[in-house]
Image (cartoon, rainbow, N blue to C red):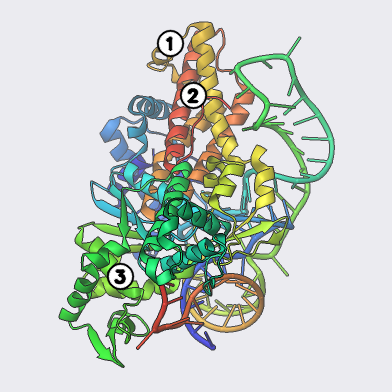
RNA sequence: GCGCCUGUAGCUCAGUGGAUAGAGCAUCGGACUUCUAAUCCGAGGGUCACAGGUUCGAAUCCUGUCAGGCGCGCCA
């Protein structure tokens, strides 16, 4: 619907990016554009006059293209809005195409096979995922699905910080707990990990490797303990993510990059370009050349690399893999690193838009209105697993996807649990369940073959509610396109809620299956179209579309 | 002190420079002998944090102020 109008408007005005919007009140029409008001300044003519010209041009084009029947009404309103109301014949035609082409009608090939990598979650393998990671996972997963549907070739990647101080601290914490379990005194590392899972890890470790550490100091067994500990944690994380419905094509290990010499190579690369200098016994990346507010140390004067060094190597590696675009999804606590990573991209000779960094704001947890202090080190945090088990993966995802990523999110865990019966996700899923139920009844009790019913139906039988639903369905492609272009999957969540919000009243009012065969046919077709759209939206969000609830 | 994000209904949040600012929850009053009541119908609820500016037009853009969050290391 919007696509057709857009094409006509572009042709009529010669302007490429035309704002097309959905009017605030449906009495104005189905779609509108303020384009004439924008042109008024340039052409120095009254906007309403320009609007008249545009309407004439559009009408002329429409009739020469596919017969005159596209619009039922066009008018100029207010300061110079052009409002379009589509003709029923056009709407029915489009509905038929939706049912016939299914998902193909809903999506647009925007990506044209371009390769995009999305890196997200990437939590340190030093403890279970908490709710903040869950938010990143839900958004990253949905964005990946969205871009895939839009014709991009998408690779999802998880970056494993398995080489630094944090996994060592985890290993030390586990070792210390092992010693305690063996009845020996052993100092617990300062800043060590206190969670219960650390003790679990220690117990597991002792079950198989008791002999290897008995009577030893941490240094003598460190590699084995560290390796065991973070591998186990990674297994837990992988399982949590799988149960949350989030999967990755690749898992990039930091350790592996060190072993392959990629960190050294990356620094040599920058050195070769003249962006590395020495000062105070350390090596610095001249990131100020590329917009950072200070230069950054990459190799410390004690000979160790900083955390930044493997990050440089990692982003260089991403670039070398030849993606057309790279997306990093980070927690808000890392936003201060944006300038230095951007500097790396520029230093390597790539334009800014080669890398998109999406910042996901913090999740603040409340329990009964009071904030829950979260500290991973102290082992006090609400895990994704905990919430997922309590309110379900679908609800949790939906909750995360009904907010813009850059809004700070407050979740009261008590409210979230209590809400489980009145959660918006059920409202949307219920549409699908109800339609499935109608189809089942039609098949079983009336012997109706759905596939036959939806092939050919009489659009003239639709009432006002039905026309409203159809028009909403036909706006899905526009919403989809905008979601893709802005990288905002939450638009889908809102759309689905709106669609559900007009379906349920309709369901209450009108019966689909009746003695009137022609009407039944038309209504089944409409239901099929709704089902296609709901399924598609939920698929992108990574939420189930159940047949029964 | 500096930087980034946020501030919209009681609560949680939508809102491409455009029309009379929306939804869900909560509250109050109603509706199940029906294809599923996880639903529906109705009601109340607003200084878009504040002050300027740009514009034919600002919740939206700019500047400042206030409030909250996060970040500013040769930590990771």
The N terminus of chain A lies in which quarter of the figure?
top left
Within 10 Å of disc 1 (Cα), the crowding (few <14, some 14-19, many 20+) is: few
Is A438 or A455 nearer to us in this picture? A438
Q: Which mark is residue A310?
A: 3
- Do dots 3 and 1 share one subunit? yes
Q: Earlier in the sequence, mark 3 or mark 1?
A: 3
Within 10 Å of disc 2 (Cα), the crowding (few <14, some 14-19, many 20+) is: many
Q: Chain of mark 1?
A: A
Left or right of A393: which side holds A153?
Answer: left
Residue at 47% in and 29% down: A530
Identify the secondary structure beneath mark 1. loop
Residue on which disc 2 sits: A527
Q: Chain of mark 3?
A: A
Instruction: Give residue A233's quadrant in the image.
Output: bottom left
Identify the secondary structure beneath mark 3. helix
Q: Position of residue A365 (x, y in %)?
A: 63, 58
Q: Which mark is residue A449?
A: 1
- Do dots 1 and 2 share one subunit? yes
Is A530 or A395 nearer to us in this picture? A395
């Amino acid at each position: 619907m919007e696509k057709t109008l857009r094409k006509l408007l572009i042709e009529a005005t010669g302007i490429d990016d035309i704002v097309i919007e959905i009017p605030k009140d449906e009495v104005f029409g189905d779609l509108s554009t303020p384009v004439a008001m924008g042109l008024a300044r340039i052409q120095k003519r009254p906007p309403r006059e320009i609007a008249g010209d545009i309407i004439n041009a559009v009408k002329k084009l429409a009739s020469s293209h596919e017969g005159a029947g596209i619009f039922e009404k066009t008018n100029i309103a207010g300061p110079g809005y052009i409002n379009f109301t589509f003709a029923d014949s056009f709407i029915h035609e489009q509905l038929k195409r939706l049912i016939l082409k299914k998902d193909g009608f809903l999506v647009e090939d925007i990506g044209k096979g371009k390769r995009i990598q999305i890196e997200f979650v990437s939590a340190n393998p030093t403890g279970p995922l908490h709710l903040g990671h869950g938010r990143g996972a839900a958004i990253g997963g949905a964005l990946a699905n969205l871009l895939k549907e839009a014709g991009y070739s998408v690779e999802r990647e998880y970056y494993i910080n398995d080489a630094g101080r944090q996994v060592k601290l985890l290993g030390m914490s586990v070792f210390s707990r092992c010693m305690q379990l063996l009845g020996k005194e052993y100092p617990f590392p300062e800043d060590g990990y206190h969670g219960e899972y650390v003790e679990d890890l220690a117990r597991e470790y002792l079950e198989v490797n008791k002999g290897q550490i008995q009577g030893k100091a941490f240094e003598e067994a460190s590699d084995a303990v560290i390796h065991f500990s973070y591998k186990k944690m990674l297994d837990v994380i992988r399982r949590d993510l799988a149960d949350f419905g989030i999967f990755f094509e690749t898992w990039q290990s930091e350790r592996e990059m060190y072993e392959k010499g990629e960190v050294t190579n990356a620094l040599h690369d920058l050195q070769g370009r003249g962006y590395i200098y020495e000062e105070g016994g350390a090596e610095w990346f001249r990131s100020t050349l590329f917009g950072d507010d200070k230069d950054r140390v990459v190799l410390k004067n004690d000979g160790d690399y900083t955390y930044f060094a493997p990050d440089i190597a990692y982003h260089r590696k991403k670039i070398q893999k030849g993606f057309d675009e790279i997306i990093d999804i980070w927690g808000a606590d890392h936003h201060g690193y944006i300038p230095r990573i951007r500097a790396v991209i520029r230093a390597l000779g790539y334009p800014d838009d080669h890398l998109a960094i999406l910042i996901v704001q913090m999740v603040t947890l409340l329990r009964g209105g009071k904030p829950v202090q979260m500290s991973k080190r102290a082992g006090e945090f609400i895990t994704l697993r905990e919430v997922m088990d309590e309110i379900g993966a679908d609800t949790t995802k939906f909750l995360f996807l009904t907010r813009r990523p850059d809004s700070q999110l407050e979740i009261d865990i008590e409210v979230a649990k209590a809400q489980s019966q009145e959660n918006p996700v059920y409202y949307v899923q219920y549409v699908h369940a109800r339609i499935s139920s109608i189809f089942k009844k039609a098949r079983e009790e009336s012997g109706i073959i759905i596939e036959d019913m939806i092939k050919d139906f009489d659009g003239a039988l639709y009432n006002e509610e039905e026309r409203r639903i159809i028009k909403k369905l036909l706006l899905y492609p526009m919403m989809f396109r905008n979601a893709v272009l802005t990288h905002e999957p939450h638009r889908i969540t809102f759309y689905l809620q709106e669609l559900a919000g007009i379906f349920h009243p309709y369901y209450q009012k009108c019966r689909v299956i009746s003695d009137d065969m022609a009407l039944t046919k038309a209504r089944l077709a409409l239901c099929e179209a709704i089902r296609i759209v709901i399924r598609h939206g939920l698929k992108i969000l990574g939420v189930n579309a159940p047949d029964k609830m």
